Image: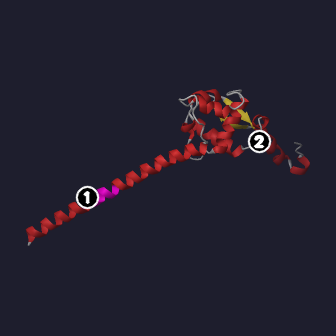
């Protein structure tokens, strides 16, 4: 892309040049620029930034191969990490030559116990985890409600006893 300093201004042109060559996706020691991702037809740059932040801050991975071999798909069912970010991860696998022709499917198969396991969509994995979290939330609310009801009963019994002693 031709970035004219005259038309765009030198600051804008320099910023755009820097942005195109800067690291967009960092997975441990592996760094991917926009050009690297574009070579494997990946243009989800916002998803790449989210993926980079989560893999490096939350999971502390070594590199892309470490993710492929040691991070299960269910481990990435995290907030702010969706199917677009997983697509970017697949592009990173492809750029590094991991997983053959279908890197995401190979990654999922690598982390399943059964050889013939049916591959489910990442959205399904997230919903499954959301369901478990929702059940935990309901159980917590149920426990709090029962605790509050038991407390009210104890207070009522105590108040009745105190009233009988006084009267």
Q: In the rendered structure, does residue 95 fall within the stretch colored magenta?
A: no
Indicate whether 48 appears above or below 8.
above
Q: Quadrant of the N terminus?
A: top right
Q: Are marks 2 and 1 in contact (CB under 8 Å)?
A: no
Select label 2 or label 1 by which is in front: 1
Using the rendered view, name the quadrant where residue 29 is placed: top right
Element on which disc 2 rests: helix
Query: Could you say which quadrant of the image residue 146 lies in?
Result: bottom left
Q: Position of residue 93 (x, y in %)?
A: 68, 31
Please tell me which residue is depicted at 17% across the width and 63% down the height of the picture.
157
- Horizontally, residue 29 falls left or right of residue 60, namely right
Do we see residue 78 in this rendering? Answer: no
Disc marking residue 150: 1
Residue 65: x and y, percent?
63, 27
In this rendering, would 95 be left or right of 66? Answer: right
Q: Quadrant of residue 150?
A: bottom left
- Provide residue 21's location: percent of width, then percent of height: 78, 37
Res 99 label: none
Camera-side residue of 99 and 4: 99
Q: Quadrant of the C terminus?
A: bottom left
- The residues colored magenta run 144-151
Does residue 52 lie above or below 139 as drawn? Answer: above
**Numbered tag placed on residue 19 in the rendering:** 2
Residue that extends furthest to the front in the rendered view of this protein = 116
Q: Residues within 10 Å of mark 2 (few under 14, many from 20)?
A: few
Residue closer to the observer: 35 or 145: 145
Q: Identify the main secondary structure in magenta.
A: helix
Of 95 and 167, the residue lying toward us:
95
* Mark 1, other Cα within 10 Å: few <14 / some 14–19 / many ≥20: few
Q: Reading the chain from its start, which is encountered first: label 2 or label 1?
A: 2
């Amino acid at each position: 892309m031709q970035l004219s300093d005259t038309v765009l201004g030198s600051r804008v042109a320099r910023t755009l040049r820097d942005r195109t060559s800067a690291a967009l996706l960092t997975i441990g020691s592996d760094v991917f620029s926009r050009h690297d991702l574009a070579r494997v037809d990946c243009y989800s740059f916002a998803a790449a930034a989210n993926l980079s932040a989560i893999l490096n801050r939350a999971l502390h991975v070594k590199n892309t191969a470490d993710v492929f071999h040691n991070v299960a798909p269910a481990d990435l069912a995290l907030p702010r990490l969706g199917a677009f970010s997983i697509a970017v991860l697949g592009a990173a696998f492809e750029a590094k030559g991991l997983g053959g022709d279908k890197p995401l499917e190979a990654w999922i198969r690598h982390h399943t116990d059964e050889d013939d396991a049916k591959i489910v969509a990442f959205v399904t994995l997230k919903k499954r985890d959301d369901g478990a979290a929702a059940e935990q939330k309901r159980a917590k609310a149920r426990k709090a409600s029962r605790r509050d009801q038991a407390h009210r009963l104890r207070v009522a019994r105590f108040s009745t006893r105190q009233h009988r002693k006084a009267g």
